[in-house]
Amino acid sequence: MVPLLWILYLTVSFLLGLIISSILSIRLSMLERAFLSFVIGNAISVWITFLVTSFSGALSTIGIIISIGICISIIIIIGAIITAYLRNTNITFTFDDKYTLIFFVGIILYLAFMNLYGVLRPDNAGNLYAFHTVWADYPFHTSVITSFVYEPHFQFPPSYPQFLHTEMHYPFLMDFYSAVLMKGGLDLRHSIIIPNILFQASLFGLFYYLAYRLTGLKMAGMIGSVIFIFAGFPPGLQSGGLHFLNPMYAVLMPQRTAMFGMALSFAVYNLLFESLFGAGGRSELFIAGMLTGMMPYIHAHSFMATAFVALFLAPASLLLRGDRDNRGRAGLKKLIIILVPLIALALPQILSIRAGVTENFFNFYPGWTDENKNIITALNWSSIPAVIYSAADTTILLLSFWAENAGALIILLCLGIIKARESAKLFFLPFLALFFITNFVKYQPWYFDNYKVFIHWLAVSAAIAPLSISWVVDELRTRVRVRYTHLATLSVCVLLIACTVFGVIAHVRMIKYDYWVWSACDREIADWVRDNTVPDGLFLTGSAHNHPITALAGRQRVMGYEGWLWSHGLNWTRIMKVKRDEIAMYKGNYRLIKDYGIDYVCIGPYERAFANENHFELNYSAFEDRARFRLIYEYGDGDKNNKPGCRCGWRIYKTQ
């Protein structure tokens, strides 16, 4: 690892995005150009690094330096083309007003606090803590990151570190990006936090400018951001029918792929709006198609949402623009400009990801949640009159469900749509269609993962909703007395508070109730494993989601947390078979250990918990057979003689 190589990588990636943004024909403010340049440049640079790594067979500092060299070459080539052929092209830097600057300073400070406090925060003893959803998800992401960093051989598709003999079709490029930064000199925590903050800030920045484009009001960008951050409900209310959780709690903090994917999506949405409804042209459409085509291995749900919106809007925009006789031809050209880069880049990824898609993906699942689906499918659909009655019951059920889950926001959205310009109304249509489809199609085995598509509808709704204030004020100023204007404005403000109060509660709970992720002992054991075992060794461990041997040392294990495996599309029957075999191996079945090709057996607190949860006894004596196992590491002794920070003893055996 080369210290500070990561800074050079980030800088060159940003400059790459900056030179590409110079091709655009639209005017961009200084901050918007910075956000857009960061997203575009890093999307391209991480793909270049991934391709270099795939060809070289390992993630290495040399490969990162080669990638930086390629990016610099692209910068020089594009710069030369602009200088030679586009002499009249000027990059105009318009500066934002002080209120916008203050707003973004506040957003960045907020994001910095959320990540520094809620993502693997160390205490004085070296234990690591996190927000609840970060505790639940990040051990998977760290296992992917560390496997990229410490595994000497890289293959495509990468190996899935949580399940033996399985290719990884989970979108991994955000974690690969952190692995690049870690290889470039950062530690694990900062290789996660720094891109988190940068991509989240870019997302909210591009969201702000999209809201400004849709409404013409900077106030809408600010208020919309607050609605977006604090929408939804805290966890624990699902039994009462409240499933629409706070987006920061449910997605934008724990789902690392969504940070990158949604930042790209909002870059595309801004480019689409300018190209189809504003001053933009073909370059905006082409770059929008290119960015969309890069998404499948960054964030599959954002790819689905963004591709749907782009392919919907290209022909639909002709309802507002162009000569009627030439609309068909113009629409076809716009579709081609978007489709060519989109298909060329996305199709190979889709074909690869398709290999991991099982029968549990893309199912008809009316009502989104399990409860709604069970109610709807239990209705009588056997005849035409029955279908009519059942369809009415389904409509009432869904209307009441969303009235509970997003009621105040829907009221503000409807008022905002009344005030919105025709271009904004048309731009919102594909998001409305996406909202409808997502209520009836389950994209992954776990129904809640549909939230990753709903969040695109939520964001654009939050961008338009602030128009409700100006609509109410304008209408009442011209029609009724001033005192009623104040009363109506107050009513809209109450609705704004209703949109966000439960999200504030969710944030308070996130901060108040943090979760222990790894102890100092866990980290010490992971360091030992990394330094004293072969990088491609296979470990038998318990299935705990935060097991340090996989999550921190980057080693392959037989089977990880069952919930991850199922939600990522692995066959449940196969998962249960491997789990039964693991139990048999911990009971002393040496033949299975050899059949699986296991190199190391771990017995520690996570394995004891695994035995307790599955109601069996670990056969300690079986692993004392020196003809079959060799004890290579011992830390503590059961519940006695523990070192500081170690909950209980660890033993690691090497199979003979």
Image (cartoon, helix red, strand yellow):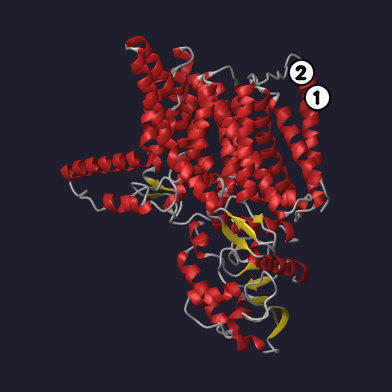
Residue 419, image quadrant: top left
363 vs 155, left or right, is left
Q: Of all residues shown, which one is farthest toward the top?
A: 478
Looking at the picture, tell me which residue is in the foreground, 72 or 484.
Answer: 484
Instruction: Tell me the crowding category of disc 1: few under 14, some 14 to 19, or many 20 or more residues within 10 angstroms, Cα based.
Output: few
**Residue displayed at 36% across by 26% down:** 491
Residue 12 at what x, y percent from top left? 77, 37
Residue at disc 1, secondary structure: helix
Distance in Å between CA atoms under marks 1 and 2: 8 Å
239 vs 314, left or right, is left
618 versus 260 height, above or below? below
Residue 295 seen in the figure: no
Residue 643 at what x, y percent from top left? 70, 74
Which numbered dot is residue 464? Answer: none
523 vs 268, left or right, is right
Residue type for callout 2:
Tyr
Instruction: Tell me the crowding category of disc 2: few under 14, some 14 to 19, or many 20 or more residues within 10 angstroms, Cα based.
Output: few
Q: Which residue is mark 2?
A: 85
Q: Which residue is mark 1?
A: 80
Residue 8, image quadrant: top right
484 vs 420, left or right, is left
Residue at disc 2, secondary structure: helix
